Image: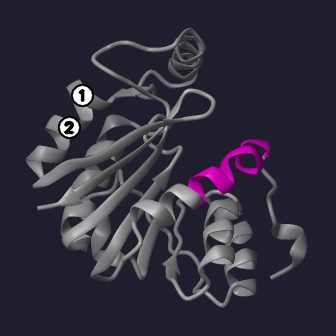
Amino acid sequence: MSENAKIYSTSAARNKEIIAGAFLRLCPQAERVLELASGSGEHAEAVLMRKPSLSWQGSDPDAEARASTTVRMEEAGQPAPLTLDTREEAWWQEAGRPYDAVVAINMIHITAFAGVEGLFQGAARLLGEGGALFLYGPMSRRGALEESNQRFDESLKSRDPDWGVRDLDDTLQPLAARFALYLDHTERVPANNHVVVFRRS
């Protein structure tokens, strides 16, 4: 596939090294990884530059995003991304199994809640015991949200009322518990984002 298919994201350029470092620090035992909503593929590329021995399976429902990720994964010696959409019933059946980690970067605020629910349900199906669901993005804590993220949340909801910044304590933790996932780690990172790791019980 042509080099011209690559997408370059300004936000990925800012955060990819932070995310790559956090993933490898928090999930050091992970060898087989599924990434959902891979987007441009730049985050996967950054992780693989640090640890090329990983087996990384990207995915995205968007054809242009898959084309970009395909080029980057070919260069890294990884398989082409799958067409996965966590809003679809039993999407995980197309993903193969098992995985040591499921990764979703800047995803849960730009999908309907059904997609968030599907993410957790699918992760519980695809992860082995102790496997990690690694999330990155803006989140509120018990309803508290920074002013910049309040504006961002309003902007998201103006584009699609089903989108929006999710609450880690009041929404994501109870959802995780439904699927036998527990909160293992959370930390603030630059630009009012969070890195969060849930693990399969």
Q: Which mark is residue 169?
A: 1
User: In the displayed structure, does residue 44 sit left or right of residue 61?
Assistant: right
Q: Callout 2: few (<14), some (14-19), or many (20+) C-alpha neighbours within 10 Å?
A: some
The one of 158 and 21 positioned closer to us in this rendering:
21
The residue at which mark 2 appears reads as 173
Say which residue appears at 60% left-offset and 14% top-offset. Answer: 148
Q: Position of residue 153 (x, y in %)?
A: 51, 18
Q: Decide: marks 1, 2 in contact (CB < 8 A)?
A: yes
Considering the numbered disc 1 on the image, is that residue within a helix, a strand or a loop? Answer: helix
Q: Residue furthest front?
A: 25
Q: Amino acid at mark 2?
A: Gln
Q: Callout 1: few (<14), some (14-19), or many (20+) C-alpha neighbours within 10 Å?
A: some
The image quarter in which residue 96 lies? bottom left
Q: Which mark is residue 148?
A: none
User: In the displayed structure, does residue 148 sit left or right of residue 87?
Assistant: right
Say which residue appears at 32% left-offset and 36% top-offset. Answer: 113
Q: Residue furthest right?
A: 4
119 in the magenta segment = no
Number of labels in the image equals 2
Q: Position of residue 109 (x, y in %)?
A: 46, 34
What's drawn in magenta, residue-wise? 10-20
Q: Position of residue 98 (x, y in %)?
A: 27, 81
